[in-house]
Structure formats: structure tokens, C-alpha cells
Image (cartoon, helix red, strand yellow):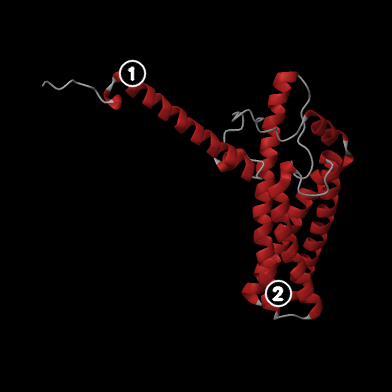
Amino acid sequence: MPATFSPHRGNHPSSQRMAGSGETRAGAARAGGLDAWIDAMSACPWPAHAGVRPARRVGGTKPRTALYTPQERARRDATPWTTVQAVLAPLQFLVFLISVALVVRYLQTGVGYEVATASIVLKTMVLYVIMVTGAIWEKVVFDKWLFARAFFWEDVFSMLVLALHTLYLCALAFGWWSPETQMMIAVAGYAAYVVNAGQFLWKLRAARLEGAGAKQTFGGPTAAGGHAA
């Protein structure tokens, strides 16, 4: 008795196409779910750092917002605290450069401990001032004293800078460790400050690019704001 030919379901061309399209849709769903998970878990205001494109919509979610909303940009341009930050930031950097030279001279030669110590204390005082005024600036612009979305990671690293500078002052005031160890704590604080300054400079560049784009789109004025951006 001749056997009746019955093709397997998977061998039929239309079945193969349907299976292929189903796998494609499943793969796209998995990719979309991964992107959505990255969006949900990443607190970083820079989505490119997490591998996510800023303007992409995934699963109906809103795209990443700009560094400033129009209202925040207007408040940034209007508040005098923006000018305060614009003055204090380069002042702190100047004090930092002078202090670095004095600290390095002491560590290399053992000469000039008093003036190097005074320069570190001055640098720390300027840091405290810029931290307080920066928090006021964030409150005015973003309605948050610290850790506003646009400057979240900059503020996080600023806490490390603040902690190291404060540790130096405590070591100096209470006589903890040797003068050389105290100076090395200051050097660690200065290294963290350089990284933090780089973060703010990068954000300043982003703010300028964003402002230029807003000017081209809306024809409005632009300005680089406080908190180093």
C-alpha cells in the first residue's frame, strides 16, 4: 500500500515564513524589553552612557528629556546665583593651582609646610562656599537642593570631594597622622576635584550645545548657566 505523503508543518514555505516572522517579533520584543529595563534602572542623566539613544521611544515611554526644560532654562538665566557660580568656579580653580604648587614643593623639599597648609584650608573654604551656593542654585533652577536630575552624578562625586577635604581639616585640627599623610589626603581630595571639574566642564559643553539648538529652533537667546553649566 503506497504511503500517503504528508509534509511536516515546519517544512512548508509559508510555515517557515510565519515561524521566521514570529522569531523576529520575539527578538524585537526582547530587545525592547532590555532597553526599557536599562531606562528604568539607569539614574544617569546621560542616556548614552547606558547605551540608550536619547530620542528613542520604547514601549510608548517618553524620550529622555533635555538638560534643561524651557522653564528651568529661564530660571537659570534669570537668577543671580548663576553669576555667583560663574565667578566662584574659576576662582576655586585658581586657588587650586596655587595650592597644588605649594603642596608639591613641600612634599618634594620639606619646605613651606605652613603656607601649603594655609592654601589647602583656603581651597577647602572656597569649596564649602561653592557647594552651599551651588545647592541654592539647584534649588532655584530645579527646585531640589542637591541631586537634581541634570546634575545627579556631578553632585554624587562632589560629595567625595567634600568628604576628602573635610577629612583633611579634621586631621589638621586634631593632629591625626603625620604632616606628610595629611598632605596626601589633600592630594587625594585635589585629584577627586579635578575629576569633578571635568564632569562639570562636560556638562557645560552640553548646556552650550543644547542652548545653541534651542536658539536655532526657537530664535531665543542662550546662556551657559551656573553650577559650572
Position of 114 with respect to 184 (left or right) is right
SS assignment at label 1: helix
Position of 140 with respect to 213 (left or right) is right
Picture coordinates of residue 137 (x, y %)? 84, 44
Name the amino acid, label 1.
Answer: Ser
Few, some or many C-alpha atoms within 10 Å of disc 1 (few <14, some 14-19, many ≥20)?
few
Position of 53 with respect to 12 (left or right) is right
Pick the quarter of the image with the N terminus: top left
Question: Residue 106 lies in what quarter of the image?
Answer: bottom right
Which residue carries the number 1 mark? 14
Which callout, 2 or 1, points at the residue further toward the start of the chain? Answer: 1
Position of 94 with respect to 78 (left or right) is left
Picture coordinates of residue 171 (x, y %)? 76, 75
Rendered image: mark on residue 80? none
Residue shown at 67% from the left, 36% from the top: 206
Residue closest to the far front:
1
The mark total stands at 2
> 139 or 18, which is in the foreground?
18
Disc 2 and disc 1: Cα gap in Å?
Answer: 76 Å
Q: Nearer the viewer, mark 2 or mark 1?
A: 1
Name the amino acid, label 2.
Answer: Gln
Few, some or many C-alpha atoms within 10 Å of disc 2 (few <14, some 14-19, many ≥20)?
many
Picture coordinates of residue 96 (x, y %)? 72, 58
Residue shown at 68% from the left, 49% from the top: 153
Rendered image: mark on residue 182? 2
Question: Residue 124 lies in what quarter of the image?
Answer: bottom right
Picture coordinates of residue 144 (x, y %)? 82, 45
Pick the quarter of the image with the C terminus: top right
**Where 61 falls versus 131 (above or below)?**
above
> 112 or 117, which is in the foreground?
117
SS assignment at label 2: helix
